[in-house]
Structures are given as C-alpha cells and as structure tokens.
Image (spheres, helix red, strand yellow):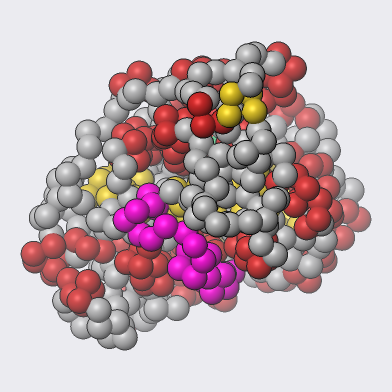
Amino acid sequence: MGGGRWNNDRDGGRTNSEIDWTIPTSRDERLEVELFGNGNTGINFSKYEDIPVEATGDNIPPHITSFDEVKLTEIIKNSITLAGYDKPTPVQKYAIPIIIGRRDVMACAQTGSGKTAAFLVPILNQIYESGPRPPPANISGKRKHFPLGLVLAPTRELATQIYDEARKFAYRSRMRPAVVYGGSNIVDQMRELDRGCHLLVATPGRLVDMLGRGKIGLHNCRYLVLDEADRMLDMGFEPQIRRIVQEDTMPPTGERQTLMFSATFPKEIQILARDFLSNYIFLAVGRVGSTSENIFQKIVWVEEHDKRSYLLDLLQASNFSDPSAESLTLVFVETKKGADMLEEYLHQMGYPVTSIHGDRTQREREEALRRFRAGKAPILVATAVAARGLDIPHVKHVINFDLPGDVEEYVHRIGRTGRMGNLGLATSFFNSKNINLVRDLVSLLVEANQELPPWLDDMFSEARYSGGGSRRAGSTKGRFSGGFGARDYRQTPSSGSARNNGSSNRPGSYGGNYGNYGGNYNSSSYNSANNVSSNDPDWWDK
Ligand code: AMP
C-alpha cells in the first residue's frame, strides 16, 4: 500500500496485495450522512451548460455527456450518486475521459467549475483499479508513507476543500486521503498520516517539511495535480514545487500522470508545463459567469473619500437580518490595514461583519470563515490573497471596494459570485487610481454583454485613440474572445506549424496573444511561442 503499513496491514487474514480495491467495503450510515448529508449543491445547470470548453492537443479522447459513458468502479459511481452529481459539469465532461485515457492535462478552469471532481474521479478510479503498491525496496522507516497520488494546492482552505471532496470519493474504499498544510501543528498532522495516506493533498511548504523529516516518500506517486498553479507561483512556492517534483523521488514526467490547473497562463506557468507535463491536452474552460452572463457586473465611479458611504448604501439594500436570504457579501480591499479598518467601521455602524487577511492566525481565519459561511457574519471583508480558493457557494454580492491592479484578479474575485450557474452581482468602485484597468475591463464587460457606464465607454475611447490607458496596446477583443481565460500557447496565431496539430473544436478563433516569451527562453520547445511577432504586447509581463 502507499502507507507504511504494507506488511502488517491485513484484511480478513489476507495481505493487502491480495485485496481487490475495486470492491466496495461495507456501508457506514453515520459516515454517509457526514459526507453527503448536505445534499445537492443546487447547481443551475441550464445556465452552466452553456460554458464552452476547448480542447487542443494530439489525439483527444471524445468528451462524455453523462457519467455512464465512462467505465467507473462501483465505489466511484456510488459516491457520484450520493453526492447528487446527476451529470458532469463542462470541465468534467472533457477532463474525465482524458485523464482516464492516461493523458497529461493543462487546464484553465476555476474553482466553482467542478474541477476538483474532474481530477479526483478519474485519478481515484485508476487507483482503485490498479490497487495498492508496496513501499519501495530497501527503504526503511516504519512510519514513512508512500502516497500513490499527490495534489498540491496554494492554501490551507483549498487543500481542505480538495481533501473533503476526496473523502467523498473514498467512501466505501480502502483508499485513505490525507491533508497537510502549514500553520497547524505538524506533529498532529504526522500522527494523522499514520492512519493512512494513499492520496495526499498538501500545500508545498508543509510537504517539503514532511519530505525533509522522512515522513513522506514520493517513489510511488503516479498522479500529480497542481491546483491553482498560478496562485502557487504568485505566493512564491516555485522552489518548493520544483523540490517536490524534480528533486525528490517522484517518478519522472511521462511515467507519472500530471495535471495542472490554473486560471491564468503567464509564462512562468507555461515553463512549469514544459518541465512537468508530457504531450498534454490543453483544456480551456469558459469562465463561469462571464460567458454565461450570470454575473451582473456593475462598475461605479466612487472617489476614495466616498467609498465608505457608498458601501453603506449598498449594504443597506441587502437584507442581513434574514439569514435565509443568503445575502452573503464579500468585500475586497487592497491592504491588510484597509481590511482591519473597514471591518472596524462596519462593525461600529452595526453590521454583522468579519474579515480575513494574511496577518490573521489560522484559527482566526477559520473562525471568521465559519461565521461567514453560517451567515452569522454575512459580510466578509477580505484581501485577495486571503480569500483565494475559498469555496463559498452562495455569495450573493462581490464588492470591489478597491479594484485590483489587473483584470485576471478581477475575474478571480467576481467568480466568487454567480457560482455554478447561480445569478450573482459584482459591484466595483472605480476612480482615477484604476485607469490602467480601462481597456481590459471594458473588453471583459463587452464580452459578457454587460452594460458599460457612459463615462467608462468614453474613457475607453480616449484610451484607444491616444494609445494610452493600458499597458496593452493590442486589440480589445482578442484576449477574452470566446470567454476563455487563456488558450493553448502551442497554438499561437503566428506559430504556423503548431497551429493545426490538434483537433480543436473551435479552429480559427484565436485572437489572443499567449505565451509571448520575452526572449529569455531558448529551449527548442518554445520555438512556436517565440515566433509571436515582437510587436505584440506581452500580456503577461507584469
Ligand atoms: P469546484 O469547482 O471543484 O470547487 O466545485 C464547485 C462545487 O460544485 C462543489 O461544491 C462541488 O461539490 C460541486 N460539484 C462538482 N461537480 C458537480 C456535479 N457534476 N454536479 C453537481 N455539483 C457538482
């Protein structure tokens, strides 16, 4: 088995090697209620179905439209039914057959798209089919664990969510998921690992620590997932990720299966893909909300000194006294100090508010989130980094009290509402500090069929004719055309040979500029990307 108890873990007198992992263990009604008791997620599939998915690469397996179209073990099928997943979400329709077909994947999909099950279902299904593996020969260490699969995620919150979803698909199986993250007692976590660790969900820093202590060995790790890869790099985890994937004992690229999920594809991410993935299929999943228009995006001009009173007006309109109104409101601010001050202010004004930011202890963040989710403090003031990766199903309103510096972050933030097809509202306070966003914001709003305030339209025209207003001087439509956050950089418009090598479902619609390398990367695998005209703006050059 993946854990260290290979030799003494017996089941009915047989060693683990003889046990068929595809056979479900007996029911546990208490656990069933714990794992699935919350019932259905309330997805509005009629809206959700419209989200386009584009797959590019060699020999792409056909996508499915129902879970019945792929051969899944009884354990997985049972969990899908118990979870109330009647049909696959768009990313699942494509990713599940591709991953079951043992291909590597680089996917542009966000939290809220069903991406967690999109990788867990096929990975765990394969783990059940191939069964446990013995620990590597000549390795001592009684309590060292050898997981069969590893999921890396940037934050404790996201790691915990993935772990919770993994527990659902582990129900009635012999597979044990485990989770480790920073900011919590490592000894407790090591003890928890001793209960079994076949699928490990980890934040990079804590895993490096565990590897250093000899608690985990990656020799048997045949499945690697990097979730929210862009955010992991933003948070400075690249050295740890490389240490884990390249400098330990993990099977090399090609031998293991590697899946990378990222909302954006800056060049650093594409370099990771080059280094970690083998002949991968690129999946671009339309942004939840922007293409299906299920987020009403309002941009209002508010001077700095008017922001607080404008916010009070907005909050006034929400019915916070009725918890069933599901009026959870997420307010984004730029700085930790700003978060503290705004929380204090709203509190003084009598609003049920809480906040999270990077200076809060783990316990404080957890408590704030718990109160928010439960509707006890239905207003959460957050900095973007602290809020990243949270799964909050019914945020009614996202308010950008401070707009972020780039439109990718804007997309991330508004994605907290209108989740899984539910209608959401996003209001952003705009003033002269945010001029740099005009061009990208307008192209995003136009694409999502949102109404532009006349002053924004004017600013956009001015920026266009003067050539200013944005670091990007290219076409306004290109980047977001089709509602995708990114496209396969191997298929850039000017890359000729690479362009039509796959079976893209939507050929001819490439308007963006992806992977325009700044000339620093001379590897031959970058030839096609390097062919991008040097006059093109570098979308990713921040
Ligand atoms: P994720 O994008 O993985 O964070 O998933 C968002 C939410 O959708 C989670 O609460 C999942 O439990 C739920 N979900 C995932 N797949 C499905 C599905 N096929 N049907 C219904 N709900 C789903």
Q: Residue at x 22, y 37 (%)?
A: 61
Please identify the quarter of the rendering in which residue 360 is found: bottom right
Q: Along the horizontal axis of the image, is 488 left or right of 75?
A: left
Residue reaching furthest to the bottom? 520
Please identify the quarter of the rendering in which residue 40 is found: top right
- Residue 245: within the magenta? yes
Q: Along the horizontal axis of the image, is 476 left or right of 305?
A: left
Q: Nearer the viewer, residue 282 or 312?
A: 282
Q: Residue at x 18, y 53 (%)?
A: 509
Q: Up-down: is 416 above or below 478?
A: above
Quadrant of the snapshot with the N terminus: top right
Across the whole image, how many numbered discs are drawn on residues?
0
Q: Along the horizontal axis of the image, is 406 left or right of 329?
A: left
- Residue 200: within the magenta? no
Residue 373: x and y in percent read 74, 39
Quadrant of the snapshot with the C terminus: bottom left
Q: Answer whether residue 204 is visible to the viewer in this image.
A: yes
Residue 71: x and y in percent read 34, 23
Q: Up-down: is 29 above or below 120?
A: above
Per the rendered image, the range of residues in magenta is: 234-258
Residue 341: x and y in percent read 82, 66
Q: Residue at x 78, y 35 (%)?
A: 374
Q: Up-down: is 142 above or below 336?
A: above
Q: Nearer the viewer, residue 514 or 76?
A: 76
Q: Nearer the viewer, residue 385 or 139?
A: 139
Q: Up-down: is 350 above or below 457?
A: above
Residue 337: x and y in percent read 78, 71
